[in-house]
Amino acid sequence: MRNILNIAAVVFATSVATAAVMPAAGPGSSLYATDAYPGFDLTGEIAAPEKKNPRWFQFIYGPEKNSPAEQMAYCKALEAEGDWSDAADEYDALVRKWPYSPEAPVAQERFADILLEHLDSTERAIKEYRYLLDFYPSKCDYAKIAEHLYKACEMWRAEGKMFIFFRFANTVDVRLAYEALVVRAPGASFAPKAMLTIASLREEDEDLENAISVYGNLRNAHHTSKEALEAIFREADARMKLLERKAYNRSRTLDVLAFLRQAVDTASNDERTEKLRQYYQELNTKLEDEDWKSTLFYDSPTRTKKSAINALQKFIAEHPGSSYAEKARERLKELQEVSK
């Protein structure tokens, strides 16, 4: 049955052109390689969702009726009475008992809706909507459910996680919820904004390296979106913070300088570009200082004149406009005269 669900998901994904949503292949697998989402934690339930099974003690937790049609009618009656808690339990029992019935995907959707709209169970609703997308991708309105899931993620981020009677910020679980959604609907209109949120949550946890990876992925995957432009400036800030935290590293500095050059070209019409230029100048000056110190090391009594000449020539070639360039040229001329 799992293979059938996989095939159904692929067929569905290629046919829903108007939804601009690509669903995951189905239970336990994905259409996307895990390395397609750098900065994401594609593990556990996100990568390999588990199918529901009937609960223990069916005489207590099983469905009230003897067929999926009768159970569906019973669930609707409970809803009509406003008995939301029992209705949710009975819809879940239907899905577990008769997972391949026509009523199952309908029951799964109503179960998630009730959790979100009537029982204040946002976290659980997110998991149940995700279950619907994973196991019934061709039996539900995939785009609509993905939108519901995105709104639920936004609500959960705003309200925090409940623990006993208190709510607190829980960036890890909230981020994982967004990541699971983007993997399942990478072409959705909300995907760029969701990825921007994921990167921001990484930054809140001081995980700058993964935040930078997500910003880069956002820029590549959705390069025409307004979020991609925003990602440029946020990534620049994150890269500069990361450089400050780590000891000076020439290759890392050159990498950031290359990013900033490209960023300035890409965002040339944005008023914030001046900040990128300031970053570039700051780093370039630091690079020149470090390279000049290295050059002076070679121009010392412990090194040969040839080494000094090579170091000076290299510095001039790499930093022709540096404040040290004139000193380098004068010293190079002196050494060359001595060598003659």
Image (cartoon, rainbow, N blue to C red):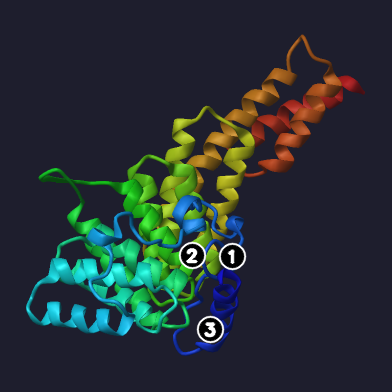
Residue occupying image coordinates x 14% and y 64% = 119
Residue linked to disc 1: 32
Instruction: Check whether the beta carbons of the residues at disc 2 and disc 3 lie within 8 A of each other.
Output: no
Residue linked to disc 3: 12
Q: CA distance from mark 3 to mark 1?
A: 15 Å
Q: Is residue 277 visible?
A: no
Instruction: Check whether the beta carbons of the residues at disc 3 and disc 1 lie within 8 A of each other.
Output: no
Q: Is residue 254 above or below residue 340?
A: below
Q: Is residue 70 above or below residue 160?
A: below
Q: Is residue 14 visible?
A: yes
Residue occupying image coordinates x 30% and y 85% = 69
Q: CA distance from mark 2 to mark 1?
A: 8 Å
Query: On the rendered image, what quadrant is the C terminus found in?
Result: top right
Q: Which mark is residue 254?
A: none
Percent across and percent down for residue 286 are: 53, 35
Q: Is residue 80 above or below residue 133?
A: below
Q: Nearer the viewer, residue 69 or 52?
A: 69
Farthest residue in the top direction?
Answer: 302
Quadrant in which residue 114 is drawn = bottom left
Q: Is residue 77 above or below residue 190?
A: below
**How many labels were placed on the picture?**
3
Instruction: Check whether the beta carbons of the residues at disc 2 and disc 1 lie within 8 A of each other.
Output: yes
Percent across and percent down for residue 109 are: 31, 76
- Name the amino acid, label 1: Tyr
Whichever of callouts 3 and 1 sits on the residue coming sooner in the sequence is 3
Give the crowd class for mark 3: few <14, some 14-19, many >=20 residues within 10 Å.
Answer: some
